[in-house]
Every structure is written in C-alpha cells, then in structure tokens.
Amino acid sequence: MGKRAAALVGFTEWAPERKWERPMFGMEACAVLAAEALADAGIEKDAIDGLVTGGLQDSPMFGPLALAEYLDIQTHFSEQVDIGGASSAGMIWRAAAAIEVGLCDTVLVLVPSTPSPSQAGDEARKMVMPPYLAGDAWGSPQSIYDIPYGLVAAAPSFAMVATAYMDAYGVTPEQLAKIAVDERNSALKNPKAVFKDKPITVDDVLASPMVCDPVHLLEMVMPCFGGGAVVVTNAERAKTAKHRPVFLSGYGEYVSHKTVTNMKDITVTPAKPAADQAFGMAGVDRADIDLCSFYDCFTITVLATLEDTGFAPKGQGGPWVAERDLSFAGDFPLNTHGGQLGMGQGGAAGGLSHVVDALTQLQGRAEDRQLASADKAFVTGVGGLMASNVGLVLEGA
Amino acid sequence: MRVEQPFSEAGRPIPRRTPTSAPFLDGAREGKLRLQRCPRDGFFFYPRPRCPVCLGDDWTWQEASGRGRVYSYTVDRVGLDPTQRERLPLVVAIVELEEGPRMTSNVIGCAPEDVQVGMAVEATFEDLGPETLVLFQPSA
C-alpha cells in the first residue's frame, strides 16, 4: 500500500495558445490560477499554507516571498522548482511530501506561463524559446563547449538520442511518427488542444520538414503560452473536496546531467530510476495502471520513456508502439489529452498538462475521451536534455 | 535576460574563456587537443578544477591523440541558433575520444549524409579570431 497522506483535489488549466492576446505578469497569472483552482477544488483560500511554483519573470529573486505577499497567503512551506520540464511533476511530489511530513496541510501548485505586459507588439507576444536556454552565462560550461558548436535549444539533443536509438535498436521513422499520430487522435477530442481540428497520418509526419535529423517538425512540440494550477491537500480535507480525491501514492525523481553529451549512456534515460522509485513506493504493478501521461517534448522522449519506465522491453519500443493504439480509444491509453505534441506546450505548464490529464481521467471529467476504467495513472516529467525525470503514481480514492 | 555569449566578427558564438578553460583553449589555438588526466580515474572533459569522479586535484594536462568516433549526431537543417545559419546543414555530433571522454563538436569535411554512428574521426581546428574551435573530420 502506497502513500495516502496527500491528495490532488482540484485544478485549472489554460488552453495553450501560440499568440497570447492578454499579457500578464507571472504573479498576476498566479492570482487568477489560484482563484480558479480553489474554486474547482471547493477549498477556501484560508486553508492554503503552502505554495510551490517555478520561475516568476516579475520576481526573479525571492520569488516565493513575493508570491506569498502578492496572494496574501502565509506559508509554512514555500518552494521554487527548477529542473526543467520535469519541474511541474516535481512540484506535485514536493507539495505532497511537505504535507506527509506535517509541515503544512494544503498546498497550491502554480505554474504561470504568460507573456509579460512589458513586451510589446505581435512578435513579442509570440512564444519563442531563447535558443541558449540560459547556458550562455559567463563561466557556464555550455557557453564554452556546446553553444559554439550549435548544440542549442532542445531539438539537436533529442535528435541525437533518436539517432543513437535507431542505430542501437533499429527504431524506424514510421514507428516514431506513429506516436505523434496516436497522440493527435486524442487531441482531436480535446477542446483545449491547439491541433484539435487537424488529424494527421504517419505520411504527414514524415513529409513535414526535417528539423534535426531524424526529427521532423510534427515530432516536436509547438511552444505556446499557457498556465495551470493544482490543489494538493491532506487526506482529511480531501474528503470535503468537490471532486474525487486522487492520492499521490508513490513518486520518484532522478537528475543525472544537463547537456546530452554528458549522459552516461545516451539510450538510457533518468526515467528508469525515477519510475522504479515511484512504483516501489506506491506498491503498484505496471500492469494495474489504467493510463500513462508521459512528458512528450519529442516522439523519441515517449519511446524512451515507455522502455525505461518498464512498460515496453528495452530496445523493443519501436515494434511495441507499432502494435498498439496509444490514443484514448486504444489498448494502451497514453496522453489522452493529446500530449503536448497534440495540445501545444503551454510553456512551463506543458509539464503540468500530464498531471492534469491524469487528474481529469481519474476524476471522471474527460468527457468525449473518458476512459471506461480510470483508477490508477502514471505520470512523468522530463527536464533538460533528457537530464531530469519525475515519476508520479496517482490513485483515485 | 542578460546575454553573456560573445560573438566573433562574423557573428558566430565563441567560447568566452575562464581561468579553468584557458589551457584547453590555448591548446586549440596551437592545434592541440588537451585533456586533463586524473591518476586514478583517467581522462576527463570538460576542464574542471577537480576530477569529476574523485574530486582530486592531482590531475595533469596531457595532449590527446585527436582520434575518436562519432557517438551520435544530428544534422541541423533550420539553424536553431540563427547566428549559425551560414553553416547549414550543420552536423552537430558527440565525439567519443580514444582516451574516453566525449565532446560536443561538428563533423566537417564530408557530406552530412555520409556521417555514421561509430565513424572514425580526427580533430581539426577552426580559427574564429579570438578563440579556436575543435572540430572533427573523417579519419584519413
């Protein structure tokens, strides 16, 4: 029996948008997200005694302090998580762990990702990731040994993982493309998805422009703005929540490097130790999981995660994917919200979309894409260049 | 955000040297690939004040053979760094050196389509003005 001390009880999620028409500073977005998530949970603001967030562009130093003041919430637990795309999933377990050890009772996890009003004009409102990902600070090893060689952004790194996978295991472009197609089939049923009206085929993926061999454009997330929040509370208060409480029964995290060049083995990701830790803590078998929601910045990320979390045999992910339907209607439901590949990556909140996907299903709120059986879910987060991983086992009460 | 990366006259990003990286960058300027070697844990890259395995400080600088193999690679077709667009298509590679450590680099001197995982390569050097890059080409 895994942990039953903390439950996820409510959430809000903003539909990702490529161009965001209503700029907001980070803490302004947090205020709106907090109000929406608390209303969804049916929990009063006075109950909050913990805040977890990521970077805040309007408070680059002392962020948790500024946020406590801004929301007028006094906290026994304040945390800022900075492990890349795994941060959102990492925020969820930190909130639950703080509740488990008795530091606090109810934690708001806030992930704003809106453009700042200090930017001007249409171009400034269009999401563009800075290619150096802050690796260009003077003294950063990346600024000396990686950036001058064109190892920037995320695509070349994940492409090199895909190249190595193809060489080692014979993974084919068609097998990788099918992941994007299956996810898109779920996105077609998600009103929040950027690509909700655009079905695609394997041929479409393979005909889309090659960005970094062997990664095609339709195998990469579209960067968007967005935002999301989740309310985590103790088991007692969870009983009074509006929706079905979802326990975080097990969790794991693993950070191994930053730059892909420095992975010990480029075909083995940090997903394995994180998942083993999470499943061990939860006491749950992989076979009992009803749905997975895996961080999917690229198709290769999903394939590697399927193998390293123990759902597909190592080296067999390609044929394994080809033999299954990964959509919400299929035999292995994965990213039933369409994934970030189908929904768009709402900035930092893209990682939270996988937590929200699992919550939506376990609370029976997935409407047209609701699974018949949804009691146990496994969620992952991936950060940096296949560098950090968080695994979460979620179980409906 | 404050951008720290310096650029060459041609607009290419160049390494900004630090006291720890200087011997490596000086070596590259002389056409030599220099690596630190720990007496217990062997060669390591990139330069650090302590061996990343044992945190010892009794390492020495050694000249490496310059030979290695392509560990993995990609071909940037779009110029993810806009300042590198004149180099497209750009082969970005991880090279595993004969001495063990891996480096980020570029493979030049052959068509991108001819690059393979495991391909034997040797170091070559590109002068960017203020600093020199360590690139690789197919072994002679």
Image (cartoon, coloured by chain):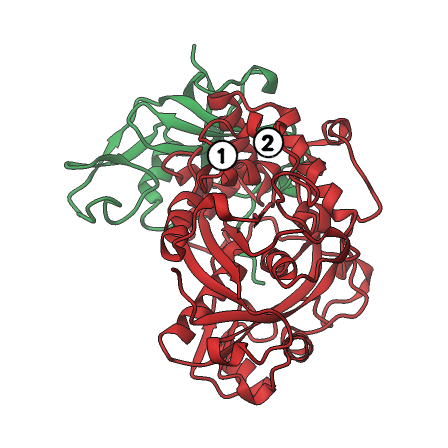
Residue B99 visible in the shown view: yes
Q: Residue at x 62, y 61 (%)?
A: A356
Q: Amino acid at mark 1?
A: Ala
Q: Secondary structure at mark 2?
A: helix
User: Is A93 located above or below residue A264 in the figure?
Assistant: below
Q: Of the numbered discs in the image, which one, if any, rests on residue B87?
A: none
Number of residues whose C-alpha sits closer than 10 Å to that of mark 1, classed few (under 14), some (14–19) or many (20 or more): some
User: Is A182 located above or below residue A381 in the figure?
Assistant: above
Chain B takes which shade in the image?
green
- In the rendered structure, the answer to whether residue A362 lies left or right of residue A395 reads right
Q: Mark 2 — residue?
A: A321
Q: Amino acid at mark 2?
A: Val
Using the image as rendered, state which of residue A146 and residue A270 is in the foreground: A270
Q: Of the numbered discs in the image, which one, if any, rests on residue A312?
A: 1
Give the mark, 2 or 1, whose residue is nearer the N terminus: 1
The quarter holding residue A209 reads top right
Residue at the farthest front position: A372
* x, y percent for residue A359: 61, 61
Cα distance between the residues tagged 2 and 1 = 9 Å
The quarter holding residue A347 reads bottom right
Residue A134 visible in the shown view: no
Chain A takes which shade in the image?
red
Quadrant into which the N terminus of chain A falls: bottom left
Contact, mark 2 vs mark 1 (Cβ under 8 Å): yes
User: Is A77 located above or below residue A358 in the figure?
Assistant: below
